Image (cartoon, rainbow, N blue to C red):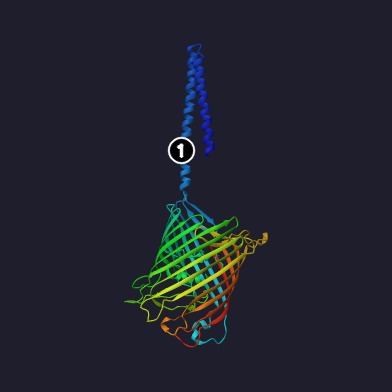
Amino acid sequence: MTKTCIAFRVALIAGASLLATAGAASAQDAAPRSPAEAEARIAALEAQLATLAQQVADLKAATAASLKDVRAAQSATTVSIAAGKPTIASGDGAFSATIHAVMQLDAAQYYQDKGLPAVLGNARDLNSGTNFRRARIGVDGKFYKNFEYNALLDFGGAGTDGQGALQELWVQYNYAPFKVRVGAFAPNLGLEDAASTNGSLFPERPSGSELARGLAGADRRIALQGQALGERWLLSGAITGAKAGDGQTFDEQLGYLGRVAFVPFKGPDWLVHVGANASKVVTPAQTAVGGAYNVAVSDRPELRVDGTQLITTGAIDSTGARHYGFEAAAQKKNLLIQGEYFDIAIDRRNPASGATDPKFKAWYVEGSWVLTGEARRYNANNFAFDAPAIAHPFDPKKRQWGAWELAARYSVADLNYHERATLAADRVRGGEQKITTIGINWFPNPVTKFSLGYYDVSIDRLDPAGGAVPLSQDYQVVNLRSQYAF
């Protein structure tokens, strides 16, 4: 029974009560002419009171049944599919479970010079082919209203498909404006790091972001993170250890990281984002009895069809490492420009006489223009940009073609330090990498994406072993990514 029906019945009964009362008063005012007439009037009043009592009883029963129906509806389990995600939730919203999955299939063709020197090893002939970069399935949701969870497995990989590994497993407590998370996940560290890989401009993050996050952050990192959010600001910090799935060490790594970001200027269709981030490896992992606290900084050239690392510092025995970074972005309607700068340093352990602590730098700038007019979404939960909302999902019958976006990036990662120094122990010949990338992204609908990209890669590197033959090379690559994610 609806609230309107209940209210209507209450009004009727109240009216009947009023009439009965008025009738009783009239009866008192008009004295009966005979005892028989008085008895008849009393009998009529008693009948009216009996009818009224029965109506009150009926109203109580109906109200109780309605409340029972409401409580049953509130506790009923619901099943729904929103944006392609199957969700099971309790009627009161206190518990939920949502299945999510990601498929990212890359197909690449590398164009390299012939007759490259043998000292390049596998880098002489990078693998043209296909690779499932990410093949993930998992479940997330909430329990007891303020708690959230996520469990995610990944069968993708770099260069070759993986055998399946734990990607994320965490629990989070929310008490606005605070969030506390514990488990295995990627801590919030930087503008590109925080953004979802499902909606990123290019298949991989710029190398500078990967180098910085690889110290104390990155995927599968076991961590405890606290975060506070405001309408225009974010403050995040975490204590981190090893990564889930890493081999056992004699002592695991211990690190700290943090990020602050805010939006100082904002309008109806534009905003400016600025921020800073930093990390510190307090104790590197001990990989050998009695020592060997190695730290290595390396990355693949912003594509994972071939898993070869073309720039790397190699293992450096260290007492610690750190990075700090700066981030900035500006968005006006369907135009976005963003960039970050990173400074990385490693503290040597027991350095040779005359050897100094190496420092490295990396930066990038990238931008996009959504040809169909949609704007990239600014995610207020992690202060990063996500894929554009799709105004007109692909439907040829309606002459709708989804969202189309042009993108470009230029990135520099320099892992050379005193590379020509006379003292060999002071040199780090990690290499300098410069990549120019242009691409086009097509979003037929919110769960599907296709990206076509062209990469021009330049590697400038001397032989780390001190040989006369350099490890430099220039090459180009064309990549197509097919993605389905919900």
Q: Residue most toward the top?
A: 33
Camera-nearest residue between 479 and 338: 338
Camera-nearest residue between 48 and 227: 227
Does 403 sit left or right of 352 as displayed?
right
Q: Position of residue 369 (x, y in %)?
A: 62, 65
Q: Position of residue 461 (x, y in %)?
A: 50, 81
Camera-nearest residue between 375 and 273: 273
List the residue tagged with mark 1: 64
Residue displayed at 53% across by 58% down: 264
Q: Position of residue 254 (x, y in %)?
A: 38, 68
Q: Position of residue 331 (x, y in %)?
A: 58, 61
On the image, which quarter does residue 421 sit in? bottom left
Amino acid at dot 1: Ala
Marks counted in the figure total 1
Residue displayed at 59% across by 56% down: 267
The vertical placement of 300 against 485, above or below, is below
Q: Quick check: can you spot residue 202?
A: no
Q: Around disc 1, counting alpha carbons within 10 Å, would you say few (fewer than 14), some (14 to 19), or many (20 or more)? A: few
The vertical placement of 160 against 447, above or below, is below
Residue displayed at 46% across by 59% down: 235
As helix, strand or loop, the secondary structure at mark 1 comes to helix
Q: Residue most toward the left?
A: 290
Q: Residue most toward the front?
A: 354
On the image, which quarter does residue 411 sit in? bottom right
The vertical placement of 131 against 333, above or below, is below
On the image, which quarter does residue 391 sit in? bottom right
Residue displayed at 55% across by 87% down: 115
Q: Quick check: can you spot residue 466?
A: yes
